[in-house]
Amino acid sequence: MSEEKNTPKPEKQLARGADPRLQRPQAAAGLVRSTQIVIWVGLGLLVVSLAWWGIAGKLTLPPVLIGAVGVLGVAMWVAYNLRNLREIAGTRAARLVLNSVGFVLFVLGIVVCLNVIVARHHPRLDLTENKIHSLAPQSMAVLKGLDNDIEMIAFLPQDSGSPKSSRDLVQLYATLSPHMKITWADYTDVTLAKQYEVTFPGTVVVKSGDRKEKVTDVNESRMTSAILSVTTETKTTVYFLVGHGETSTAGGQNSVAALKSDLGNQQYVVNDLDLAKMATPEIPQDCDVLAIIGAKQAPTPEEMKAIEGWVDDKGKLLLALAPPPAPDFSAILAKRGVTVLAGVVIDPDANFLGQEQVPLVTPNPGSPIVEGVERLVMPFARAMQVQSSAPPTTPGMPPPPSGPAVGLLDSSASAWLQTNPEQAGMPQKPANAEVGAFAMAATVDEAPPAPPAMPGSPPPPQQDQDATRIVVIGSDLALTDAIAQRFKFNSYLALNSIAWLSKNVRLISIPPKTETPHNLLLTSTQKNFIIFVVMVFIPLGIIVAGVSVWWTRRR
Amino acid sequence: MKSMLTVAAKEFRGYFTAPMAYVVILFFLGVSGLIFVMTLTMPQAQTSNYRDVLQSMVFIALMMAPVLTMSLLALERGRGTLELLMTRPVSDWAIVVGKYLAAAGLYVSLLIVTLLFPLMMSVGGEMDWGSVFAGYLGLLCAGLAFLAIGIFGSAITSDQIGAALGSFFILLLFWIIGFVGQSVPAAIGGVLNHLSFVENYMDFARGVIDLKNVVYFLSVAGFFVFLAERLVENRRSI
């Protein structure tokens, strides 16, 4: 041990400068101290520069200059100590450490690259029962149809000011289409907020070229509508007929102001139409859809003639009927297979909270208008009969095409017709009441249906789609704000109807996906059994096993 | 490969002969079970929602992993048996990965036991099994990452408590990094969020399997096991 101590170590002595010939001059000692300061100052400046960059969120001249001075300081120190560094690096241990560090950095680089690549293109699998974390087919169709890049500037704070679901949704759009790009904007960046006229956090600006659309209430329906808005060239004009006691579009619980506002959000142009103010009643040229919601008085013969003529000439009509004695527009509907009956539907089996005048309806499947719509309330709904004028089937021939009218909402089979809906109190079923499943909404599409294909023959060519379309809804109340805001699916009924009428199938509203709540019903015995197994049996088993091991090892 | 499995089997058996492992198992199953029972017996528990239990279990796994792995390499170094092991015809990889696999095996066994919870819950109501599967896959991936950090901590020092504390510190750092990400500029916040265990696990807990999250956890697991192996090899060479 003492020998080892006394054995000279030339390398170390040289390094320490034992040989006076190799010692630095006294004057240089201060310089050495200075270089030690330089390395720390240099590293400090580098940290300051990076912190500045991080806090500011962008690289400006000051952090670049500070960083450059820091790098210069480190470089000076390295240059001055190059010989010592080479000596240290020359040892076996240092080589091993350097090799290892290099290898670690190499592997780290691969790991980072892998994660960056996967973060850009990552398939995802939504295993939830209702696919609540996936986009609806309508949104997927819109994304697939994109030709141009769309930028989403998301002013979504990451704190509680914005729900995580909003960020996830924006991220999902970007994940599912290479044309969708996200810019996570800093809401505190006043310049950027001013540039996009964003006034509160939680806003997403959807931008394509010069066109941009702000989404303040971030949900799938709004986001998809905004994408359509910045990519669709033409706008659809909807006129609401007024002057016959129709439901107001101006505001209030019994108005359809929310519907009007939603249509505006979906890039429709919405106007009121008062035919009485015209010298000659006429539907405007730019009218794509005419909505008559809850007319209490019949239009004048001139007005009716104008409406009927317009509908006959490939017009698109949304008709929501008020309870009797309001007009039933039979002149337009009867010849198309829809007969409005003289009464409202009373449904003792399927109703809202026992109110038989308020049927609760599950839509008939098949129409895009009710796709994803689960249940609708139809207060004081006019009953209808829908006749599909299908000719009889000839043996050996393909099945006949269906007629233009199709029932959309049907009551239960035990429903009956109340002919005096203004009667107060619970409806009393008269002995001679008409009973059965009544239609409460129907669609009419006069486009000639494609002839069904014969077995083995090629599919039939597409027919001209521009023809008269009508959606008739038996309850005007079902579309009012009071109902539609409480029962979300009711608001989709009107929006989807207008989208279908105007052939904006891509604008069909997307009902929110909800988790199916599975009720948990455990008896007290079952609960106690579970508690016993989880809190007593399992822990006790582990304790007994552990103590027995300890006891065995002790012996 | 064979030597790796031999090491893994020996270590796995070793867990069941040490009282400490029973304490850890009791902690994991006891606390998870308590949360599960609380979920069942709460007055507002009217739906068979297992998500809350899954979200709690991942943090319990985070606390458990350092204790489960602290002795794997640190104890061997402390006793001087690691050097003895290195004299055997077993590579460093086989030693480190074998020990890691043993810890992972014990962790998977614990997860299998906790499958009893959703099974028992399904007696009282229909379960969304897709979500449960995704949650368990997330627990598995996250657990593999936690254990890898644990074995890395165990390779740093010969002191078991120091190893556990060191790994817990790293794990906690990865856990809270996402919360820090919420209060820094978006660009940096995005990177921190991507590194956060919480952010990467939440998709699993919600019933979504995203390749990004799977790759993240497996990358962390692979990288820290690799670091542990480097430490062992460097110590042998130097």
Image (cartoon, coloured by chain):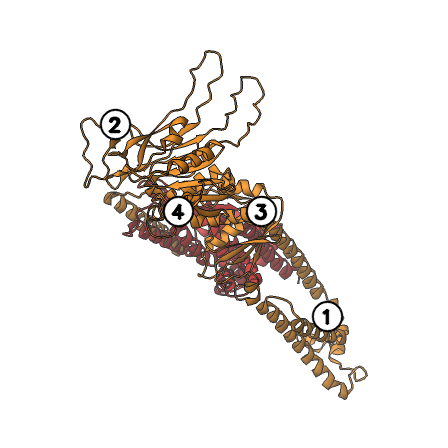
Chain colours: A orange, B red
Label 1 environment density (alpha carbons within 10 Å; few <14, some 14–19, many ≥20): some
Instruction: Find numbered disc 2 in the image and state the secondary structure of the residue it sits on.
Output: loop
Measured as percent of width and height from the top left, residue B194 is found at 55, 56
Label 4 to label 1: alpha-carbon separation = 54 Å
Q: Which residue is mark 1?
A: A88
User: Are the residues tagged 4 and 2 within 8 Å (C-beta)?
Assistant: no
Question: Which tag, 3 or 2, sits closer to the chain's start?
Answer: 3
Relative side of A426 to A549, left or right: left
Q: Are marks 4 and 3 on the same chain?
A: no
Front one among B139 and A173: A173
Labels 4 and 1 touching (C-beta < 8 A)? no
Q: Residues within 10 Å of mark 3 (few under 14, many from 20)?
A: many
| Residue bearing the label numbered 4 | B114
Mark 4 residue type: Thr
For label 2, count other residues whose C-alpha is less than 10 Å away and answer few (under 14), some (14-19) or many (20+).
Answer: some
Q: Are marks 4 and 2 on the same chain?
A: no
Amino acid type of the residue tagged 3 in the rendering: Thr
Badge 3 vs badge 1, beta-carbon distance below 8 Å: no
Disc 3 designates what residue?
A: A231
| Alpha carbon distance from label 4 to label 3 | 50 Å
- The mark that comes first in sequence, 3 or 1, is 1
Mark 3 belongs to which subunit?
A
